[in-house]
Image (cartoon, rainbow, N blue to C red):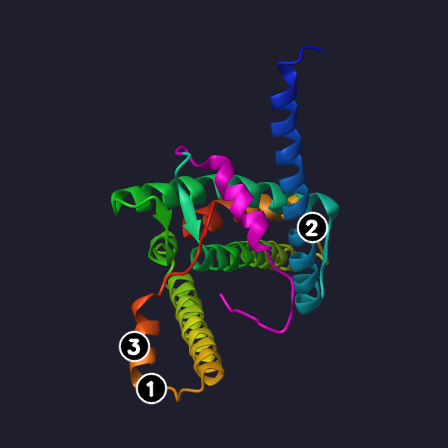
């Protein structure tokens, strides 16, 4: 086997591993639906849903990248994801709601951190610290 | 589409990140942590919709097992809705 085949095989293995991870989660989620609806899923139907989900990720990824680029950014943010969910009203509502929960969570976390650090320094919390927390809404980037 | 919070099943952030990165054209493209969490939610909804619609189709045909043809039947509308 030629050494040039190595990176190809690495990529294939990587993709296989990701597909397996998706398949596992699809299995779990389908099991939940099965219990809800009192029905069974054949192995092939779960494999099909898994395959479809993996393929749909390609569309999502490309769209997200385009949206960010359109906004002259290299970092995809939550607004891009909301754009992705525009086709169905209920989906958009759900995603928007999740996004607001996340933002609220982030705020609360920052509040807790600021309270801890100021308690450690022996100062009392003030309103100025809360404003500083609101200024930075998006947190760390994932490469 | 009804969300349910009681169960723990879902996509791991790292998995979603790696899958999306497979398809980015630009090396410099990154995704924020919050956006990743939202995408994990989105995928969860997608899978649950696919499963639920497949189940509804099988039940409409008076069957108690979802087979691949039920998934195939609901696929076009699912993709249009997403």
Q: Which residue is mark 1?
A: A126
Q: A104 or A94: which is nearer to us?
A: A104
Q: Secondary structure at mark 2?
A: helix
Tell me whether marks 3 and 1 sit on the same chain.
Answer: yes
Q: Which residue is mark 3?
A: A131
Q: Is residue A118 above or below residue A90?
A: below
Residue B15 place in picture, x, y as percent: 59, 48
Tell which tag, 3 or 1, sits nearer the viewer: 1
At x 60%, y 54%, the residue is B54
Q: Which residue is mark 2?
A: A24
Tell which tag, 3 or 2, sits nearer the viewer: 3
Q: Quick check: B53 left or right of A78?
A: right
Q: Secondary structure at mark 1?
A: loop
Residue that lies at the very extreme toward the bottom in this rendered image: A124
The numbered mark, 3 or 1, whose residue comes first in the sequence reads 1
**Circle 1 residues within 10 Å: few <14, some 14–19, many ≥20:** few
The segment highlighted magenta reads B1-26
């Amino acid at each position: 086997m030629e050494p040039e085949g190595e990176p190809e095989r690495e990529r294939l293995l990587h993709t296989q591993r990701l597909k397996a991870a998706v398949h596992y989660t699809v299995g779990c989620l389908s099991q939940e639906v099965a219990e809800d609806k009192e029905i069974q899923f054949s192995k092939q139907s779960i494999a099909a849903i898994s395959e479809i989900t993996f393929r749909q990720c390609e569309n999502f990824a490309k769209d997200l990248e385009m949206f960010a680029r359109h906004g002259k950014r290299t970092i995809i943010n939550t607004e891009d994801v909301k754009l992705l969910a525009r086709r169905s009203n209920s989906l958009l509502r759900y995603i928007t709601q999740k996004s607001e929960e996340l933002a609220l969570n982030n705020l609360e976390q920052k509040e807790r951190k600021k309270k801890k650090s100021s308690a450690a320094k022996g100062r009392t919390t003030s309103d100025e610290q809360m404003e500083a927390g609101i200024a930075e809404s998006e947190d760390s980037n994932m490469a | 589409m009804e969300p349910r919070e009681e169960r723990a099943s879902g996509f791991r952030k790292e998995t979603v990140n790696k899958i999306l990165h497979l398809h980015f054209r630009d090396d410099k493209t990154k995704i924020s942590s919050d956006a990743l969490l939202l995408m994990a939610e989105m995928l969860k909804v997608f899978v649950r919709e696919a499963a639920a619609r497949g189940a509804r189709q099988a039940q409409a045909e008076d069957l108690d097992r979802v087979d691949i043809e039920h998934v195939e039947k609901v696929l076009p509308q699912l993709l249009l809705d997403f």
